Amino acid sequence: MSVGGRVLVGGDECHVVCLRKVPTTLKCPSVPLPQLSNTSFHVGYYVPPAVEPGDPYGGLEEVWNQHFELLFRNLPNMWTFGPSEATLCGWNVFKDMAKVRFSCQHCSHGWTSMYGLVVFYYRWDDMANQGEVRFILTGQKCNQCHPDGFETPMWYPEEAQKVMTNLYHEVAGRVYHLQTPPLIRDRRHGRPRHQHNSLMCQACREGLCKTPKVPPYSS
């Protein structure tokens, strides 16, 4: 179910259980996801950036919403999902990398990057009796015309699915203490012609690319 542009998953109140009562020996439910193809985003090879006013992700959020609902409805509690406009202090952080594509809106220069970063923030809200997940996507600048703003990344279908699967296992393992498979670290094959330019990377400039040591989960 979608409420206010965010997906709500899970059951009603009779489903809700205390997070700390989930046995530590249970395995995380395995969820078969739909096979993605070049037409999975209804726009071709990858998701373009903004395709219409008010849509900064070009359909990526809709695809993530669908996968989020398929995955997180297998957990004992309700979880919500949506974008965040700023970093969230006091939330748990999960970062994932993907191969992404960029296209400059000023000069049409295109390039790929193996450092497409998405930052997921998640927490358990005792007052609302549900979990919350928010995400931030970071961009890169064109190195040909050097515009002021950052370009929004275009995601390949399998990369979009990979990071959502990793997020599901992150929450299942760290919040519910379920046994989960290793995170998927493989990325779409690519041979970038240039090294990653941290001066053109929004995540590097904002200090998000550096991955800190994972602290104990806090609710």
Image (tube, rainbow, N blue to C red):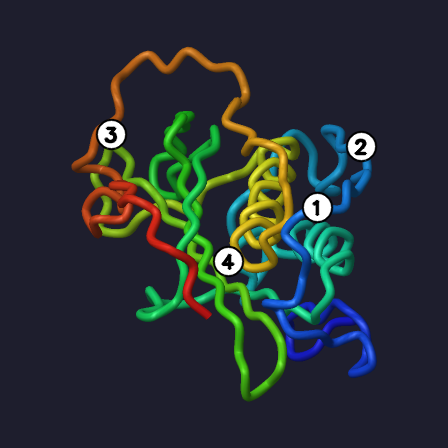
Q: Is residue 91 visible?
A: yes
Helix or strand or loop: what does disc 1 sit on? loop
| Amino acid type of the residue tagged 1 in the rendering | Cys
Residue 16: give its label: none
Kind of residue at disc 4: Pro
What is the C-alpha distance between the residues marked 3 and 4?
Answer: 23 Å
For label 1, the crowd category at 10 Å Cα-Cα, with few meaning under 14, some 14 to 19 and many 20 or more, is some
Which mark's residue is nearer the viewer, 1 or 4?
A: 1
Instruction: Provide the residue designation for mark 4.
Output: 56
Residue at the spot x=64%, y=31% of the render? 158
Instruction: State the image coordinates of residue 67 (x, y, percent, origin top left).
Output: 71, 50
Q: Nearer the viewer, residue 41 or 204?
A: 204
Residue corresponding to mark 3: 144
Q: Secondary structure at mark 4?
A: loop
Q: Which residue corresponds to the image point at 22% horizontal and 42% vertical from the top-left? A: 204
Q: Circle 2 sits on which residue?
A: 35
- Side of 72 relative to 50 (left or right): right
Q: Nearer the viewer, residue 108 or 215?
A: 215
Disc 2 packing (10 Å; few <14; some 14–19; many ≥20) = few
* Horizontal side, residue 127 vs residue 30: left or right: left
Res 35 → quadrant = top right
Q: How many marks?
A: 4
**Residue 60 seen from this side:** no
**Above or below: residue 218 compared with residue 198:** below
Quarter occupied by residue 102: top left
The residue at 74%/54% (across/down) is: 66
- Dot 2 falls on a residue whose secondary structure is loop
Q: Residue 41's spot in the image, x, y percent?
A: 71, 42
